[in-house]
């Protein structure tokens, strides 16, 4: 049940990663230099309020160290790379497991 859900979400996030990669490639071609859009830039465009509230929540409730070096470093990575990694994790979690025994082995 959950495996199917993980696979569906994983393929949707993989499609999003492909779209983001194509956007970066087309921007790089038109600009003549390498253009990589970070996840922080996309998040600031889509919903800047949640970015600020996430920063405040993590800094106040858990620890400021978690936000500044850890999350900020992840947010500076290209958006397509983060989406690709998330999709691979979801697809890995949703994969069908092989039988523990061989085809002709008795259980």
Image (spheres, helix red, strand yellow):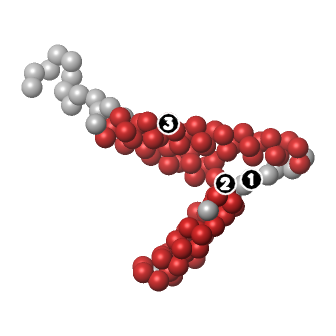
Residue 59 disc label:
none
**Looking at the image, residue 98 lies above or below residue 59:** above
**Looking at the image, residue 4 lies above or below residue 17:** above
In the image, taking residue 26 as reference, residue 9 lies left or right, namely left
At mark 1, the secondary structure is loop
- Which of marks 1 and 2 precedes in the sequence? 1
**Looking at the image, residue 5 lies above or below residue 77:** above
- Which of marks 3 and 2 precedes in the sequence? 3
Image position, residue 75 (x, y; %): 61, 63
Instruction: Please tell me in which quadrant of the rendered image residue 90 appears.
Output: top left
Residue extending farthest left: 107
Q: Which residue lies under the disc numbered 3?
A: 11
Residue extending farthest top: 104
Depth order, front residue of 82/55: 55
Indicate which label's residue lies in the foreground, 1 or 3: 3
Q: Which residue lies under the disc numbered 2?
A: 78
Q: Which residue lies under the disc numbered 1?
A: 36
Pointer 2 with pointer 1, Cβ within 8 A: yes
Tell me the crowding category of disc 3: few under 14, some 14 to 19, or many 20 or more residues within 10 angstroms, Cα based. Answer: some
Q: Residue at x 17, y 16 (%)?
A: 104
Tell me the crowding category of disc 2: few under 14, some 14 to 19, or many 20 or more residues within 10 angstroms, Cα based. Answer: many
Res. 92 in view? no
Q: Residue at x 21, y 22 (%)?
A: 102
In the image, taking residue 67 as reference, residue 95 lies left or right, namely left
Pointer 1 with pointer 3, Cβ within 8 A: no
C-alpha separation, residue under disc 2 versus residue under disc 3? 19 Å
């Amino acid at each position: 049940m959950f495996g199917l859900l993980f696979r569906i979400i994983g393929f949707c996030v993989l499609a999003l990663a492909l779209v983001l990669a194509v956007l970066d490639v087309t921007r790089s071609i038109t600009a003549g230099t390498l253009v990589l859009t970070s996840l922080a830039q996309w998040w600031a465009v889509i919903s800047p309020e949640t970015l600020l509230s996430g920063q405040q929540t993590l800094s106040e409730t858990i620890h400021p160290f978690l936000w500044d070096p850890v999350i900020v470093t992840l947010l500076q990575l290209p958006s397509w790379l983060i989406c690709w990694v998330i999709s691979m994790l979801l697809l890995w979690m949703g994969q069908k497991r092989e039988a523990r025994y061989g085809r002709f082995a008795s259980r």
